Image (tube, grey):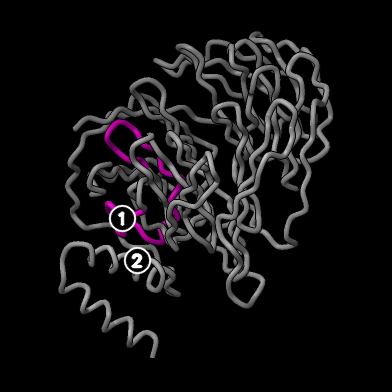
Amino acid sequence: MKFFFISILSLLVTSCFGPLKELETQINDVYFDTDLDNTPEPLQENFQNKVTTDLLWTFNLKDFPETGEIVFADDFIYLITSSGHFQKIDNKTANILYSKNLNIFVSSGIFYDEKKENFFFIDSDNFLVKLDKDANLIWKTKLPNKSELAPIIFNNQIIFKYKNHNIQSLDTDTGLPLWNYNRQNPPLSISVQSPLMIADNILYSGFPGGKLVIIDPVSGAFLSELTVSRAKGVTDIEKTNDVSGNIVIINSLLFAASFNGDIVCFDRTSGKKVWSRNVSSYYGLTSDLVNLILKHENDSLYNFDRNNGKTIWKNSDLIYRKLSKPLIFKDFILITDYLGILHILDLTEGNLLGIIPLLSKDFEGFVDFSESGAIKNTVNSTKLYKHNDFAYIVLDNSKMVKISINE
């Protein structure tokens, strides 16, 4: 009966124009974006690319950590392998300029300080290790818990968010703890976590239970807590509503999205809710301070008006293709699917402009289409970066490419 009513309402809406078109989108968001058939949308046949891409180089990543990172400093790229090889790479040619075997097994990293003079990584025994720019050991200190997120460097601090959602700050000069923030969380949460973010000397991060926490990064003092969404449904899975993705701040507005919940805009000064939409995401939001991009859990892409939450455009060409986190690059959105194919969308209109294969590999080895319901197993771990006028893509922790895009 409910779907009959929705069908009639949608039919009436689609025959109208103006503001009612937005109502149709909101109805689709709530009722039709959670299909049981999760078959990946097939690629368009005979698609003609409307942009040109130049593949400038390919670098084979050997033994790259599962939570590995690359960092850019001037004309160089730095990384560290799982077996402890610290490498300095020429950004123009992808030639290895310097390599040093540290004889340490690595689980996460590499990260660098604000001056790009020191580097950090986490070894397999969960020690945080600090190196100078020549990869000489400065100090190491044991961390109390595992972390799969990149830390934040703030003044003289390196701040971690651990898998148990506790936050700790350490002195970058000595490695000694400065402060801890601990909290009780719901017993059930997804394994994708919301990264830390600092804006105007205030630290923000999302948590399970639909919460967004605000902390003073100097002292670690709790400042405030905002509710992005509340638990819905009957089962524990249905009630899971973690703020698990990126948070965005644009001027006085704070934006956050939750899995099984909503996207919400808050006034940063008062904490009051400005608007909300019932759209679920576990990757959160991406922004260039003008556009507000969200990847729905079914892989639809949205661009929302940051002032009122209305849908500027929605693209459903790639639903259930296990898309990565989107990257805004110039006037485009870059995103990869479960086959390692790069999709290029127009930022203004949301139209698909390019389909570029980057990885020739069977999908079962790239993204696990698990039926267990574990979100972690179905997340595309591709990392997309931009530096100067180029985009860099790390695929399957085995291959890094550098590309340029021209209209």
- According to the picture, the residue beneath numbered tag 1 turns out to be 311
- SS under mark 1: strand
Q: Quadrant of the C terminus?
A: top left
Position of 130 with respect to 287 (left or right) is right
Q: Quadrant of the N terminus?
A: bottom left
Q: Residue at x 74, y 32 (%)?
A: 220
**Along the viewing direction, whichever of 284 and 204 lies nearer the viewer:** 204
Q: Residue at x 65, y 48 (%)?
A: 225
Relative image position of residue 55 (x, y in whole percent): 32, 29
Name, please, the residue furthest toward the front. 270
**Does the magenta-highlighted stretch encompass residue 52?**
no
Question: Looking at the picture, does residue 344 appear above or below residue 230?
Answer: above
Relative image position of residue 217 (x, y in whole percent): 68, 29
Q: Residue at x 75, y 62 (%)?
A: 187
Instruction: Name the amino acid type tagged 2.
Output: Gln
Structural crowding at the residue carrying mark 2, measured as other residues with C-alpha within 10 Å and reported as few (<14), some (14–19) or many (≥20): some
- According to the picture, the residue beneath numbered tag 2 turns out to be 26
Give yes or no for contact between labels 2 and 1 (Cβ–Cβ under 8 Å): yes
The answer to whether residue 103 shows anywhere in this view is no
Relative image position of residue 287 (x, y in whole percent): 40, 39
